[in-house]
Image (cartoon, grey):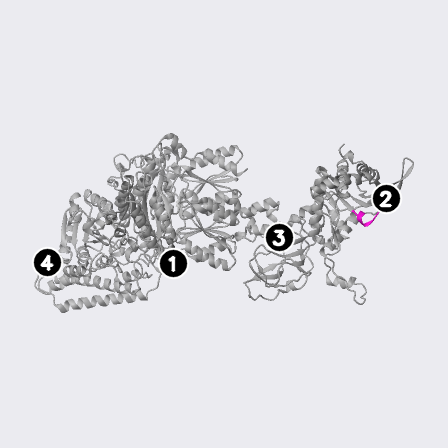
Amino acid sequence: MSIKSYREATFDAMKEEMIRDGTVYAIAEDINGNGGTHGRYTGLGEAIGDPGRVIDAPISEAIIVGSAVGAAMSGLRPIVDLRFSNCIPCAMDEIVNQAAKSRYMFGGQAKVPMVIRAPDGILKMQGAHHTDCLEAWFTHVPGLQVVVPSTPAEGKGLLKTAIRNDNPVLFFEHKKLMAMTGEVPEEDYTIPFGKARVVREGRDVSVIVYGIMVSRALEAAEKLAAEGIDAEIIDLRTLSPWDREAVLASVKKTGRAVVAHEAVRQSGFGAEISATIAEEAFGALKAPVIRIGAPFVPIPMAPNLEDLCRVLPENIYEGVHRALGRQSDR
Amino acid sequence: MATEVLMPKLGLTMTEGTILEWKKKEGDPVRKGDLLFSVETDKLTNDVEADADGTLLKILVPEGETSGCKTVIAYIGAPGETVGAAPASAAVPAPAPVPAAPAALASSAAPKAHREGGYVTATPYAKKLAHDKGFPLGEISATGPRGMVMARDVEAFTPAPRVKLSPMAARLAEEMGVDVSVFESVNRIMKADVLGMVHHEEPAAPAPAAVSAAAPPECAGEKPEKVSALRRSIAANMSASWSISPRVTYTHPVDATAMKQLRASLKDEFKEQGIKLTYNHILMMCTARALTEFPDVNASFRDNMITRHHHVNLGLAVAKGDGLIVPNLKNCEALGLAEIAKGTEAMIEAARTGKLTMDGMTGGTFTISSLGPYGITSFSPIINQPELAILGVCDIVDTPVVREGQVVVRPMMNLCLTADHRVIDGVMASRFLRRITELLENPCRLLA
Amino acid sequence: MRKLSFSMATCEAMAEEMALDDKIFVMGEDLARQGGIFGQFKGLPEKFPGRVIDTPISETFIIGGGVGAALAGARPVVDMHFADFIGVCMDEIFNQMAKVRYMFGGQAKVPLVLRAPDGMTIQGAAQHSQAVEAWFCHIPGIQVVAPSNPEDAKAVLKAAIRSDNPVIYFENKILYKETAMVPEIADEVPYTIGKAKVRREGKDVTIVSYSIGMKNALGAAERLAKEGIEAEVIDLISLSPWDKEAVLTSVKKTHRLCIAHEAVKQGGFGAEIAATVAEEAIEYLDAPILRYGAPFCPIPFAPTLEKMVRVFPEDLVKGIKGMFE
Amino acid sequence: MKVSKEQALKFYETMCLIREFETSVKHDFLNGEIPGFVHLYIGEEAVATGICAALDDTDYIESTHRGHGHCIAKGADIDRMMAEIFGKKTGLCKGKGGSMHIADFSVGMLGANGVVGGGYNLAAGAALANKMILKNDRVSVVFFGDGASNRGTFHEAANVSSAWKLPTIFVNEMNQWASTTPYETTTAVKDISDRAKGYHMPAVIADGKNVFEVYAAAVEAVERARAGEGPTFIECKTFRVEGHFVGDPELYRTREYVKENAALNDPLTWFDRTMTRKNGYIDGVIEPQELEAVRAAAKEKIVKAKEFAMSSEYPDPDQYTADLYL
C-alpha cells in the first residue's frame, strides 16, 4: 500500500498493462504535449520504454475513436482519451454504431477491445461545453460497457480490467477525482465488472451512487450517523453491466433507496436504478424511491448558478431525510 | 432536538395507559427498536419499543402512574441535551376519557390527506405489513410524507376489536358515551345492547364532582382508590352480562374415575413430548365435542337473532394479577387432546405475561371456568357475553356413592352450567350437561 | 375527414406550415428528387421550389447548418434519413442545437425541427432499426416528440415547426404506412408540446407508451378487456417535456402501471416514467411497476432473431394479468 | 491597397483593445479573479481586426474558444464582454456562457464555441439561410485554427459552401499550435489553405501580423461572397504567443522559442515600426505620440471594463433555468 493520487494510480495501471502487453497503445490529443488533459499521460512513453505506443492525434475525435475500433478489430488494445466527455458526441457514431456493434453484427468474428477514457463533471466555471456527465447514453447502448471509478485504488483496478477486457469500455472519470489521493495497493490487481461495492454498511436506507458521488455520499452518511440514521452506501463501480442483485438485496434489507448522480436527473442512469427497484423490490419499499440529479439545464458559467447544478452531500443528506419520511416532499 | 416519547394509543378504545415498567433508566442509551417500557391498558399489557436512537433523557411518567394517550411520557435525545419540563397534560393523570368513537366511524378520526378518492395511500411495505397482520389500512393514522401510511404507522397500530353496530346503536353509543368495545363480539350490536349497558356501565373515570358526591364517609386513612383499568373493564363486562341474560345454573355430578385413568395412561407419554396434561384439557375436549352436537349452546344471541357458530372457540377464565381475563382456544372441535393441551398452556402463559394478541381475546363461543383447585364444589359462573352459557368446573372429591346396590367410593366432580334462558331451556341445558358427563365417564365415546 | 397515411399527414403539415411562413425550408439527403426515402416529403419540392434542399451525405452539416440557419433567422426542418445516423452529428445536436440559446443568455433562438425516422422495419438490422429517443430526453434544451398515428403526426409536426425551440420529431418507419381519418383543417393550435392523450379509459391498470409502442398498448388493452381487466392507455406523444401529471393522475386512479416501448429497456425512457412514479406516487401502487422494452442487444438481422427483440401485446397481457394474482 | 489614416488608426485601436483586454484577463485569471478556462488571442490581433473591418454589423462571424479578439473586432460591448468572462449578470450572455461561450448577436457575433471545429457548419448554415432562404447578401465568416482544420466538420462545411456557392468565408488562424501539439506532427499539409483546392475554393495566404494584408484579403473575399461567387479560404500565418490556456505549463516548447517567434510575428510592434515611417499602406506616417494616445485610451477602456465587471452582481439564482426554452 502507498498513498497515490488518482492520476498516478491510473498511470500505473496503464504503465503496467502496456509493459505486460505490447498490443496496448494510447492515442489522444495533446497526449505528449502536456501529458494529456490533467497530465494523466506525462512520461508514459518513457515509462514503458516505447514512446511509439503513446500517439499524438489530430483534433479529430472521429479519427481517434474510429481508428481505434479498426485497430482493435485487427488485434490491438487501444486506450483512447477524449479529454472531455463533451467531446464524445463528436465520435458518437464511431462509438455506438461501430465500436458497440461490430462484434455483434459480424457474428462474433471480430472483437473490439478498447478503452475510451473520458473526464467529466463540474470542476469550476468551465461552462456548458466541458462539464456534462453522459454515462446514461451509453448504458442504453448494447455492446458497450460503462465504468465509473470512485477512488484511486478503484481507478487502478478497474482500468486494468478495462484494458484486459475484450469489449469496448467507456471509462468516465470525474475531473475532481484526478487529484484525489488514497491508499493504492502496489501489486497487480483487477476489479471485476458488474460487481458493486458496499462502501458502508447500514440498516436504515440504501444510498446507491457511483464515481465522485461515492465520497459525497460518505460525507452525507457521517452527518446522518450523528442523527442515528444508519445509511448503507453502494458504489456501483460499473453501470453496464450493473449489479442489480447487490442493489436489490440492500434495498430489501433497508426498505429505502436514494439514488444520486451528478448527471442531469431526467432520463439519467438513476432512472434505471430506481425503476428496477420499483419493479423488483417493490414489496420491500418503506418509502418512495428518491432520485437526485442535476436540474434540466446545461451547466451555466456563473459560479452561483453553477453551484445549483452540483449534487453535493447536502442534497444526498436531504434526500435520505425524504426517504425516511422525516419531511414531506418538496 | 430531543424526540418526545408519547403514551401510545394502542387500539381504538384506549384513552389512557398505566406504566408497568420502564425497561430503561434515565441516561441509558436507547436504539430504535429497543424495548422501552410496558404499559397496561384496559385489555392487555403491551411492551412498547423506542422509535428513536439516542439517550433516555427524562422520564415524566414513573412506573405505576397513568397518563392519557398521546401525552409526552419521556424524552429521547443526545446525551446531555436539556429537555423542557413535562407538558402539563402529561403531569396530571389522564382526563376523563372522551366517548370512544365506534369502529364504524373510526376512520373519520384518522388524517384525511391520504384518502382522496377513498383510496388509502401507503408505502408498498406498509401495505404488505397491514395485509399480513390483517389490519384495515383505513384505520391506521398516517405520518408519512404526502399523508401516506408508513410501515412505522402499521407497527404502532393496535386494531380495535371488530365491533359492528347498527346505525341506531352507533348513535346511542356516541350520545351516551358507551364504550361499545367491551363487547368483544363477532356480532352486530343492536340498540338493545347499548341501552342494556347504559344502566350498568360504571364510568371509567368518574368526574371529580361525581366522586365527592358519591364519596363514602371519610374515616382515618380511608380513601377511595382508583382501580386498575383491567378491573374497571371486568366490572363493566360483568354488570353488562348480569343485566342482559336471565340465567339458570344447573349442577350435575360426574364420576371422574375414567377421566383420571385417561390422564394417568397418557401423562408420561405426553410429558416426553413436553406436554403437561391436566383434567381441564380432557374436559375441554369433551365439552368441545358436546358443543358440536348442541349448536344452540355454541351460539350467541342478539336482538332476537341467534348466530350458531361453526367453530368451537373455548374460552378459559384465567386469573391475572388482581384480575381475570378470558382468552380462548380456536377451533377446539378439530383439535386432538395433545393439541388442546399444548394450545391451552401456551394461551394461559400468554395471558399471564400479557403477550396475548387481540385475536386470542376475541371470538370465543363458550367459556369454561374452573375453581376445582380451590376446593369449590358448587358455584354459578356469569356468562361471558355474548355467549349463551358457561361451564363451571368444581373440585374432584372422593365420595361414597351407590353402584349396583353397593356403597363405593368414587372420585366425584360437580359440573355447574350457567345457561341463558332466553335461548337455552332446562331440558336442552340438562341434555347438554348429561352429554358432557357421558363423554367424561366413558372417553371411548369420543371415538364414536 | 378523410383517410390519410402517416407520411402523407406529415407532408400536409409541412405544406400548410411552409405556405404560412416562407422562412421555413427543408434540408436533408434524398429529398428533392423522390420526396424522401419514405415519401414523407412528397410534393413539397414542386410546391416550394428552392426551399427543399438536397444535401450531401454530411450529417454534421445538415444539423449544424440547420442550427446556423436558425440563428440567422430561418426556420429549418432537417431530415436525418435514419435516426441511426444521428450519432454522426451528436455534437451538433448536444453541444450546439441544445445549448446555444442558453449559453448565450437567450440572445439566440433555434426554431429547428429534426425529423428522425426510427425503429425496426423488417430486418433493417443493427444500423437501420434503432430507437434512440432516450438519449435526447437526457439533453436540456431540446424537445422530443414521437406521435403514434396520422392525425397526431400532422398536428404534432405543425406544432414542432411553430415551436421556437429545437424539436426532435421521431417518426416510426412502420407507422408511415398506417392510414386513418385526419381532419381537413387543423385547429388553430394544432397540438401543445408536452401534452399526453388518454387513448382509452380504464380503471384497473395504466399502460403508458408512445409511437409504435401504442400498438402494443392498445392491443393489450383490448385483450385484457375480454378478461374483464379495464386498462387505461396513455399516449405520451411528447417525451421531453413529458406529461407527468397525466400519468400520475391515471396511476392514482388505477393503482397499477405498465410501461412499454420498442427501445432497449435498460436506460430507456420507460425508466424515467417508472422512476418518477416510484418517487411521486408509489403510495398509490398496488403492484410492482411493469416495464417492457427490447432486450440488451443490437437489432439482429435474421427474422427469427429479430422477433426476439420485439415487444408484443401478449407480453403486456401476461404481465398485467400477473398484477392481479 | 491603401487605406485612410483614420482607418489605419481604427485598426490600431482595435488591436490595442484586444491586446489590453487579453493582458488584463490574463492578469486577473492568474490572480484567481477569473475562473474556468480562458484562451488568449495575444499575437493574433491583426487577423480578427483585418477580417472584421471588412464586414458590416449585419454580417456574421462564428468564433472559437479563443474568441475574445473576434468579439472585440466585431464590435461587441467591451464592458459586457468583461462582465461575461467574470460570470456576471451584466455579461453579454447574462453570466451563462463565460469566456468559451461568449456571443453578441447584436453585432452578428454568433458565438465562441467550446467545441473545436464546432463553428463551420453553423457559419455555412447561416450563409445558406441568408442566400437561399432569406435572400439577402449577408456573409458568414468562420474563424478556426490549424488544429481545428482536421475536424471532419471542416470538410463537410467546406464542401457544401463551395457546391452551393454560399457566402461563407473560412478564416484559418494558422498559429502553428494545436493546443499543445505542433501542427506539423498531426497535419499532412504545410499550408492549411492547400485543402481549399479539394473543394474548388479560392484560397489566399496572408501575413497574420500585417493587418492591411489581412484586410485586403477579407475585402476581396467579402466582395466575391456578396456577388454570389461563393466561399473563400483565407489562411493567416500567425503565432500563438500564450499557452493554449492561461496556466498552461507549456512543457512542449521553450521560452526562447516563444520569445523569438512572438517578436517576429507581433502585429503591434510591426504596426508601430511600419506606420512611423513611410509605407505603402497609408499616405504619410503616424506619429509615435498618436499611437501612444491610442494605446493609453485602450488601456483606460479596459480598466473601466474591469471595474464594470467587478462591480456587477452575479446572476440571481432563480435565473438558472431561464433562457432555455421559449
Q: CA distance from mark 2 to mark 3?
A: 60 Å
Residue on which the image places disc 3: B109
Q: Position of residue B230 (x, y in %)?
A: 72, 54
Q: Nearer the viewer, mark 4 or mark 1?
A: 1
Dot 1: element: helix
Dot 4: element: loop
Q: Residue at x 13, y 68 (%)?
A: D288
Q: Chain of mark 1?
A: A
The kind of residue on which mark 1 rests is Asp
Residue on which the image places disc 1: A307
The kind of residue on which mark 3 rests is Ala
Q: CA distance from mark 4 to mark 1?
A: 53 Å
Q: Chain of mark 3?
A: B
The answer to which quarter of the image holds residue D266 is bottom left
Q: Position of residue D137 (x, y in %)?
A: 20, 49
Does A274 lie within the magenta span? Answer: no
The kind of residue on which mark 4 rests is Lys
Q: Residues within 10 Å of mark 2 (few under 14, many from 20)?
A: some
Residue that protrudes farthest toward the right in the picture: B405
Dot 3: element: helix
Q: CA distance from mark 2 to mark 1?
A: 94 Å
Q: Residues within 10 Å of mark 4 (few under 14, many from 20)?
A: few
The span shown in magenta is B370-377
Residue on which the image places disc 2: B398
- Left or right of D179, for residue B116: right
Q: Nearer the viewer, mark 2 or mark 1?
A: 2
Q: Chain of mark 4?
A: D
The reply to whether the C-beta atoms of the residues labelled 2 and 3 are less than 8 Å apart is no
The reply to whether the C-beta atoms of the residues labelled 1 and 3 are less than 8 Å apart is no
